[in-house]
Amino acid sequence: MPSPVSIPESVSLAVHALVRMAAERDSVLKLGDLMVRPGSMDHLSKVMQKLVAAGMVSSRRGRSGGFLLAVDPSDIRLMDVWIALEGTFQSAVCPFAGRGCSMRECVFGTVASDAAHLIGDYFSRTTVADLAGLFMGKGN
Amino acid sequence: MPSPVSIPESVSLAVHALVRMAAERDSVLKLGDLMVRPGSMDHLSKVMQKLVAAGMVSSRRGRSGGFLLAVDPSDIRLMDVWIALEGTFQSAVCPFAGRGCSMRECVFGTVASDAAHLIGDYFSRTTVADLAGLFMGKGN
DNA sequence: GACATTCTGGTAGTGAATTACTAAAATACT
DNA sequence: AGTATTTTAGTAATTCACTACCAGAATGTC
C-alpha cells in the first residue's frame, strides 16, 4: 500500500459495475460486461453476490441471464456500497489513541481524519445516479 | 481495512518514535521506551532498523544502548519517513484508469486523489520537529 | 572474564484481501 | 430431452503487512 488513501478493490469493482448498470438500465448485463479490468472477473463474481444479497441488484441465471439494478440508482449511496462490502465505514484515527499516543494533536487525529471525512462525506452524499451522468459509454 | 485512509502501522510506529526521540534529544531511548502500544515491540524493532539504515537514527547496542536521532528533527519530513519505510509515496488514482474505467471524472480520480494530496502535502510540509512541540510527556 | 542488557537479523506464523479453480444449479434455445 | 450459457457457492492458493520467536553480536557492569 504505497498510498495513504485506498479504496478496496471490491468497492471499486462494485461502484464501477453499478454505474455501468445505471447507465444501461434497460439491459441485463452479465459478468463479462461488467468486468472493468482483465482478470478481475473472479473477484467481481463474489462482489456481485454481495450486492445481490444487499438487495441493490437482482440476478438471473442461465442463457440470457445477468445482473440488473433492483432499486433506483439515486437510492444507492456510495456509502451503502462500502458498508455492504466491508461491513463498516470507519473514520481514521491514530491507531494508538488512548493506548500510548502522547501527542496533543496527533497526525492521525487531524490530517488523516480530515482526509477520511472528505471521503466519508462524499460517499454519503453521492449516489450511483450522480456518477452515471459521468459515464462515457461501453468502454469496449 | 474499514477506513479509506490508513497510515501503515510501520509509519505510525516510526513517527511516534521519532517524535519521542526529538522531545528527549539528550537521552538514549531503548526499544521499550519507544514502544507506543503494548505488543508492538517486535514490529518496532524492524522499523527502527530501517530508520537506522536510512540514516535518520543511530543506534548503540549493549547495556546502556538504544536509539538517538542522527540528524536534526527539523530535517526529517514525514514524507521521508514514509519513503524510508514504504519505498514510494503514491497518490491515489482509479485502479482501472486506462484499463477499462469509463468515467469522465472517476471517483478515484477526484475525491480519493484530493484526500491523498491533503495528506501528501501535509507529509511534505511537516517535520518531526513540528510534531515534537505537540508532545505531552513520557506517556508511562 | 563472566554476565546481563540491548540491538541485529533471520525465519516462521497469522490474518485479511485478492486470485484461481471447480462443480452445481438455473435458464433459454433447439 | 439435450445442450450451451450464466450465476452460485465452496474451497484452495497467493500476497502482503504484521506478529512472534530465537540465536547471535556488541557493549557496559561487576
Image (cartoon, coloured by chain):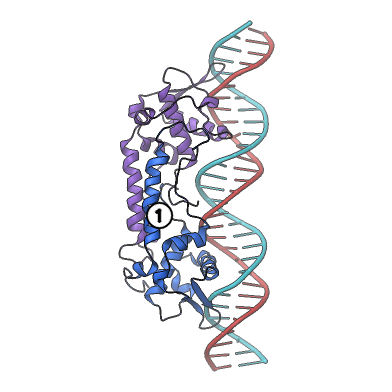
Chain colours: A purple, B blue, C cyan, D red
Numbered disc 1: what chain?
A: B
Compare residues B47 and B94 and report the one nearer the observer. B94
- Residue B100 position, x and y percent, is 51, 32
Q: Residue at x 56, y 32 (%)?
A: A41
- Residue A21 position, x and y percent, is 44, 25
Q: Which residue is mark 1?
A: B120
- Residue A7 position, x and y percent, is 44, 43
How many numbered tags mark residues here?
1
Where, by quadrant of the figure, is residue B74 drawn? bottom left
Compare residues D24 and A129 and report the one nearer the observer. A129
Q: Residue at x 40, y 59 (%)?
A: B124
Is A127 drawn above or below residue B75 in the view shown?
A: above
For residue B136, side relative to residue B9 (left or right): left
Residue B2 visible in this rendered orientation of the protein? yes
Q: Residue at x 43, y 68 (%)?
A: B76
Where, by quadrant of the figure, is residue A112 drawn? bottom left
- Residue D4 position, x and y percent, is 65, 16
Q: Quadrant of the C terminus of chain B?
A: bottom left
